[in-house]
Amino acid sequence: MFGPPPGTRVFLACGVTDMRKGFDGLAAQVQTVLAQDPYAGALCCFRGRRGDLLKILVWDGQGLILLAKRLERGKFVWPQAASGVVSLTPAMLSMLLERIDWRMPAWTARPETAV
């Protein structure tokens, strides 16, 4: 599983993105929609209309990396805003990639008995 190191900046493009776009098209989206520099090392995330495909664009110092994840079932949790940008922590991105609702994670490990 992909997990960015602590301190990595993560940006989500709210709304939907044309998932036919590749490196250059998404780098242009980073500049116009997110108002960020695509070569600054931040992870920039985009989601398609159906919600089951996620693309992440990041600069590693030598070139652009494009990661894609397609879900077999379900959708990625995404902000409801029609446009704009949302900033996440690396931990929130890890939850998003696992289909956990990063906006309000539920506590799942409850103690059985008090000792």
Image (spheres, rainbow, N blue to C red):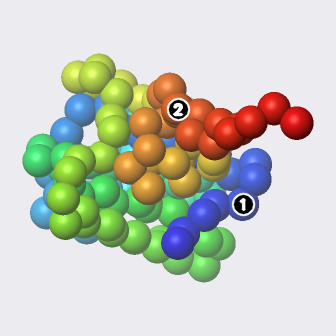
Residue name at image x 13 percent, y 63 percent? 20
Q: Could you tell me which secondary element the residue under label 1 belongs to?
A: loop
Q: Which disc, if any, is residue 61?
A: none
Above or below, comparing residue 44 to residue 14 in the picture: below
State the separation of the CA atoms marked 2 and 1.
23 Å
Above or below, comparing residue 7 to residue 22 in the picture: above
Q: Earlier in the sequence, mark 2 or mark 1?
A: 1
Residue name at image x 50 percent, y 41 percent? 11
Residue name at image x 68 percent, y 39 percent? 112
Residue name at image x 52 percent, y 32 percent? 106
Pointer 2 residue: 106
Where residue 19 sits, quadrant-wise, is bottom left
Q: Nearer the viewer, residue 56 or 95?
A: 95
Pointer 1 residue: 5
Residue 54 placement (x, y as % from top left): 30, 57
Nearer the observer, disc 2 or disc 1? 2
> What's the residue type where badge 1 is placed?
Pro
> What's the residue type where badge 2 is placed?
Ala
- Decide: few, some or many residues near mark 1? Use Cα within 10 Å; few <14, some 14-19, many ≥20: few
Q: Nearer the viewer, residue 2 or 23?
A: 2
Q: Could you tell me which secondary element the residue under label 2 belongs to?
A: loop
Residue 37 placement (x, y as % from top left): 53, 47
